[in-house]
Image (cartoon, grey):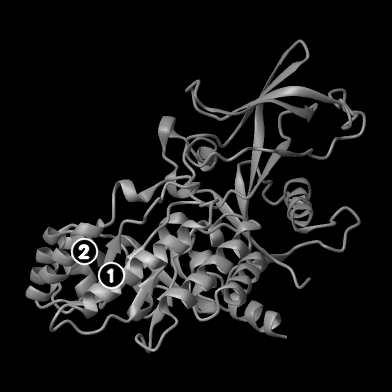
Amino acid sequence: MAEAAAMRAVLEAPGVKGLEVLRLPYDEATTTNEKDAVTALIRRIVVTASDPPVTSAFSVLNLSKVAELFSAWRRGLEGVPPYYAVKCNPNPALLGALAALGAGFDCASPAEMDAVLALGVPADRIIYANPCKPESHIQHAASVGVDLTTFDSVEEVDKLRRFHPRCRLLLRLKVPDAAGGALLDLGTKYGARQEEVAPLLRAAQSAGLAVSGVAFHVGSAVSRVGVYDAAVEAARAVFDAAAATRGMPPMRVLDIGGGFTAAATFQDACDVINSALARHFGDDLLPGLQVIGEPGRYFAETPFTLAARVFGKRTRGEVREYWIDDGLFGTLCCVHMENYVPRPVPVLRRRAAGDDDDEGDESETHPSTVFGPTLDSFDVVVKGYHLPELRIGDWLVFHDVGAYTTALSCDFNGFSTSDMKTYLAFSSV
């Protein structure tokens, strides 16, 4: 019942309401799981659509997956509201779905704040989680009522004093051993060191700014989840330092950042965090503590699937070489930027009866290279991957391509993902 209510809220959300939302075909014999269902939907789109025919790459956003992930977050980290990191994927339907489910938002720029506010999200559900901000951006946050931000330098304190004096601050902390198993160690760029904490607290106090709590980020796509324990322990030390600073009001907010994935390690991370919170903050000294998180890829990665069209082919002995209309400068930039391992699923367009070019047997495969559309030789999606014989007009499907994909793409060579269509889908299963 709760799942049905959540899905109804998503379908009525700004960014979703009024748009066509396709039902995933779980009723077909070939669809035994979620990814099979999405592939089956893509097959329907590219094979049966004819008015007009689909001739360029597109994505599918599975809204049911978003609702499922939100429910899993609430079970795993009860009482810790997620503030989705917009930078990961700013798709309006994804933002609207998360807003309808009750998420807050981690924004790093005026454009991201405006995108969220345009969906009707109140400003108090936004954290300006950028420790170093241009002055005009701080002024914009003040003008739209975003009153919670992060900092990690005395210089930032001075800017906030001048341009947003009513803003509440979270001291961004450099996490101990943040590089342990992270795809990207954010501590190389942001975060106050232990010896910098006391001077920063004094600077904020002298400037008349309220330090409401502590923020940290253990790094992107963390696999060694034990790092959360060390981070929570370090955060508690900052709370204690603030409490020992004369005249400083008690801090009430702990932002545990991101680093979460939708893989099996998510529950492991939840277990470590819950245990660490109980051990380091589970006393009577901190009543009313609010803990929040900043997941990005956790919500964005798995709900998105890419379908790219084969528009070129070359045969060299046993090897087949194919060109598709998306690549490493587009959605599939995640191959290079995110260590994404492509496992393309072929979807063959309908063959006409008596077609002389119908190679037939899909069970026979060939070592294949798949190129993106640009002229750059770097634009190789996958090499040596076994695929059945494809023709121009067939499609390759890439699952789990929603995190740091279109958000990091560019218009190199005039190929752009900015106009790529996203089909919305859901399932009642």
Q: Tell which of 149 and 120 is nearer to you.
A: 149
- Eyeballing the image, is 392 above or below 26? above
Task: First in sequence, mark 2 or 1: give its number.
Answer: 2
Instruction: Confirm whether residue 146 shows in the render.
Output: no
Circle 1 residue: 238
- Eyeballing the image, is 243 above or below 176? below
| Rendering coords of residue 286 (x, y %) | 35, 85
* Quadrant into which the N terminus falls: bottom right
Label disc, if present, on residue 47 of the rendered structure: none
Count up the numbered dots: 2
Circle 2 residue: 197
Horizontal side of 291 relative to 400 (left or right) equals left
Q: What residue type is labelled 2?
A: Val
Horizontal side of 17 relative to 43 (left or right) equals left
Q: Tell which of 251 and 245 is nearer to you.
A: 245
The residue at the point 41 percent across, 70 percent down is: 105
| Rendering coords of residue 260 (x, y %) | 52, 59
Residues at marks 2 and 1 touching, judged by CB atoms closer than 8 Å? yes
